[in-house]
Image (tube, rainbow, N blue to C red):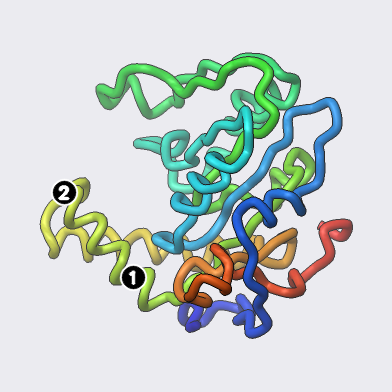
Amino acid sequence: MHVAPGSSEPTVTDWRPVTVDELVGEFPSAGASTRIVAVDGRSASGKTTLAERLNAAIANSAIIHTDDVAWCYSMFDWSQLLEDKIIDPARQGEPVRYQPPGWEPNGRSGALELPAGLDTVIIEGVGAGRRELSAVLDVLVWVQSDFPTAHVRGLERDIASGVNGGPVECQEFWDHWMRSEIPFLDNDRPWERADFIVAGTGGPVGPDAGDLTVAVHPTTPPSDR
């Protein structure tokens, strides 16, 4: 496992295999409030896949992708919008219907919607577990990834979707994004506040290895977030 060049993120070496249901069983309850679970990690680390698997394993849950909040607005300056417009009402069990500021000016219709009375909302994306949101998160999962593997996976995904153009344009966009993402994460250090660290690339294989690979010890106890 090779983390981003120059990053202070420690490489986890002590892992344990778990099933998705076992991992969910270790999540704390939010009591009477809707539980907010953040799935954070680097680009193409496996965050979306993990969030979808958690969503399938948790009854009465839904996912919000931070990319949808940030779309055509700002790479990372969206935490207050996410908290005020989505997390706060969701925690109170209220319905959510929110159109992020970049949508209408750029021809995107619709809105982000959550029904009332959800038990869990999963916030997925780079920066989902950022420091500014610590007070409103019940669980923070950091997805650690091998940086070269994530790079290849991310480019293949973007080229296949055509979202950023052809191979050259996708590589240019990736490099542009990394110039912001790497220092942002290294300054925020979400892995230090993580309740769970999950391997997003690699991990054990075989029928007895479990569905996921989770760090034996998070970097910092949850009570110290």
> Which residue does the numbered mark 1 point to in the structure image?
151
Residue 29 seen in this snapshot: yes
Tag 2 or tag 1, which sits nearer the N-term? 1
Q: Position of residue 107 (x, y in %)?
A: 25, 22
Q: Is residue 98 left or right of residue 116?
A: left
Using the image, tell me which numbered label, if any, was put on residue 162.
Answer: 2
Q: Position of residue 19 (x, y in %)?
A: 61, 59
Q: Residue at x 66, y 43 (%)?
A: 37
- Crowd class of label 1 (few under 14; some 14 to 19; many from 20; radius 10 Å): many
Q: Residue at x 38, y 37 (%)?
A: 71
Disc 1 to disc 2: CB gap under 8 Å: no
Q: Label 2 sits on what residue type?
A: Gly
From this view, report whether residue 52 is shown above or below residue 172. Answer: above
From this view, report whether residue 24 is shown above or below residue 199. Answer: above
Q: Residue at x 76, y 53 (%)?
A: 26
Where, by quadrant of the figure, is residue 36 drawn? top right
Q: Please, what secondary structure does the residue beneath circle 1 have?
A: helix
Residue situated in front as seen by the camera: 209 or 223: 209
Q: Is residue 199 left or right of residue 21?
A: left
Q: Please, what secondary structure does the residue beneath circle 2 have?
A: loop
Q: Position of residue 112 (x, y in %)?
A: 47, 23
